[in-house]
Image: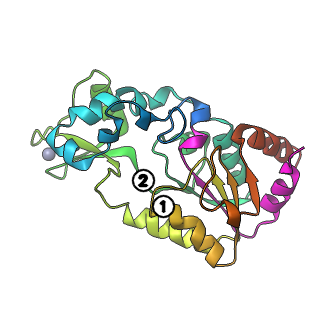
Amino acid sequence: MKEYDKLFDRITTARHLVAFTGAGISTLAGIKDFRGKDGLYKQKDTEKMFDIDIFYEDPTVYYNLARDFIYGLDEKEPAIVHAVLAELEEKGFLKALITQNIDLLHQKAGSKNVLEIHGSPTEHYCIQCDYKTSFEEVAKTAKTGEVPLCPNCGKQVKPAITFFGEALPQQAMNQAVQEASNADFMLILGTSLQVYPAASLPAYTLQAGGEIAIVNDQPTQFDSYADFIFDDLEECFEALDKFLKKI
Ligand SMILES: [Zn+2]
């Protein structure tokens, strides 16, 4: 028996618990991981999908690949990790949730304090003028295979997702660093901690004297610093869910 009970005790006795999530938690909801075994980046052309130069030149590259992956998200449901994290927040144990994910599933599960450090498709904006529009509006056009264009100037609209070649959203990143530094315990879930500067967040917790737990199906560079290491997210969160239901 794995020591999920000890992890649960640590979670419920933390002074300031913060979770940091990556694509691995959404594979349980049927969403493709980027760098995992069957990751999205193993498919042809997907590394170009979030390239900012390519997006300016030819937005069809992004919109073709995003048609199902992003604009079909309203058909996806949160998985067990999303649900348990939302409940931990509701019960007052979880103070902040930092995510690299752009799939909106934490919000759909009911999480409130979500810091989206790789941006979010909730908002879209014109690359030329100050026109802004919503995910729902853009999805209507994107699902037909057309590139959504600005009604004012005719340029393509871009999701507020951070593309390669763009800076991370400053405000969300600042808040994430603050939360990580303030955390006495950080849950690191479904991220292989390869993308910087996001991958440096556990270091803020450790430097401030906090502890970390890592649940991921692949090893990470922070494994030797972790107080808890598990490799099966689904099994771990089903166990945590059972403990949580008893209190
Ligand atoms: Zn415009």
Residue 104 drawn in magenta: no
**Is disc 1 placed on a helix, strand or loop?**
helix
**At x 32% / y 52%, what residue is drawn?**
164
Q: Residue furthest left?
A: 153
Q: Which comes before the other along the chain, label 2 or label 1?
A: 2
- Label ID, residue 198: 1
User: Eyeballing the image, is 159 above or below 185?
Assistant: above
Provide the secondary structure element on which disc 2 rests: loop
Residue 29 seen in the figure: yes
Residue 168 image position (x, y, % from top left) = 37, 60
Left or right, residue 160 beside residue 114: left
Q: Are marks 2 and 1 in contact (CB under 8 Å)?
A: yes
Q: Is residue 38 left or right of residue 233?
A: left
Residue 190 in percent (x, y) is at 61, 47
Q: Is residue 69 above or below residue 56?
A: above
Highlighted range, magenta: 1-26
Rate crowding at label 1 as few (under 14), some (14 to 19) or many (20 or more) other CA atoms within 10 Å: some
* Residue type at numbered disc 1: Ala
Q: Is residue 186 visible?
A: no
Residue at the spot of label 2? 118
Task: Please tell me whether residue 104 is drawn above or below residue 119 in the rendered image.
Answer: above
Instruction: Between label 2 and label 1, give the one nearer the viewer.
Output: 1
Vertical position of residue 24 compared to residue 145: above or below: below
Colour logic: rainbow
Which amino acid type is marked by label 2?
His
